[in-house]
Image (cartoon, rainbow, N blue to C red):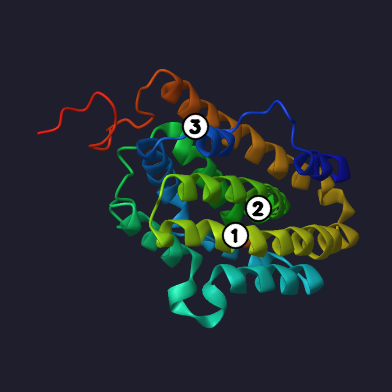
Amino acid sequence: MTAALDALLVEDVDARGVSHHLKDAGEWWQAREYFAQRSIYHLKEADPHAWVIPRLQGQAKASLVAVEFDEYGGGRGARLHSRLFADLLEGAGLDSGYLAYLDAVPAEALAPVAMMSLFGLHRSLRAALVGHFAAAEITTAPSARRIAAALERLGAAPECLLFFTEHIEADAVHEQVLRRDVVGDLLAREPELAADVVFGVQATELLEERLGRRLLTHWERGATSLLTPLPDAPGVAVL
Ligand SMILES: [Fe+2]
Ligand SMILES: [Fe+2]
């Protein structure tokens, strides 16, 4: 478990993920595609993780709820992370309606979201949900930093940047809380769940890697990564 989580903290210098590409060479139409791909989850950010709350006990429960409180805006509706993402979409001229891009995104974008629901809805997979959540929080801050830099370079609207700058600091804290207080306490109570935590971490990595590859292989060819391209994608006729 420790090895699986530590591996996420060490970024391979040769690894070229979506956030690296966006930071160094990303174009605005690619950033917009990235937002559309991610909208399936981020417009309901933190909801699948709320399902695990009644399946936890003690400190693990208290600390997971503390992280969820931040994801839900700390009592302020305008600061719900799902609201920040809706603001981002509107700032990028995209549709902020829930599942507006459901038919436009490929299976690779749906799979991580289906995984969260699966883990959240089954008590037997509660430790996998916790592992997934920890993996997501550990990897978010560095990638959010790169995407914020990309959006600054591209001159994106401030509401596009806010979603990512908010996550740079918040997730650096969430990572620690998830690791020490949620995973740590859960496994102190139920050490037999360690393999499930690792499963959640690795399933997340696998599916995120697959989505990233879909985006990058299409973009390398100058093609849209969506099933239905946005109007500003290359090769789309301007009417
Ligand atoms: Fe968040
Ligand atoms: Fe977070």
The kind of residue on which mark 1 rests is: His
Residue 135, position as x, y percentages in the image: 70, 48
Would you say the residues marked 3 and 1 are in contact, meaning their CB atoms lie under 8 Å apart? no
**Quarter-wise, where is residue 20 in the image?**
top right
Residue 43, position as x, y percentages in the image: 42, 58
The kind of residue on which mark 2 rests is: Ala
Q: Nearer the viewer, mark 3 or mark 2?
A: 3
Q: Earlier in the sequence, mark 3 or mark 1?
A: 3
Residue drawn at point x = 26 percent, y = 36 percent: 232
Disc 1 residue crowd, few under 14, some 14–19, many 20+, Cα 10 Å: many
The residue singled out by tag 2 in the image is 141
Nearer to us in this view, 34 or 27: 27
Say whether residue 83 is left or right of residue 195.
left
Would you say the residues marked 1 and 2 are in contact, meaning their CB atoms lie under 8 Å apart? yes
**Quarter-wise, where is residue 59 in the image?**
bottom right
**Quarter-wise, where is residue 66 in the image?**
bottom right
Residue 46, position as x, y percentages in the image: 55, 61
Say whether residue 128 is left or right of residue 28.
right
Residue 25: numbered disc: 3
Residue 167: numbered disc: 1
Q: Of helix, strand and loop, which one carries label 3?
A: helix
Q: Is residue 74 visible to the viewer in this orientation of the structure?
A: yes
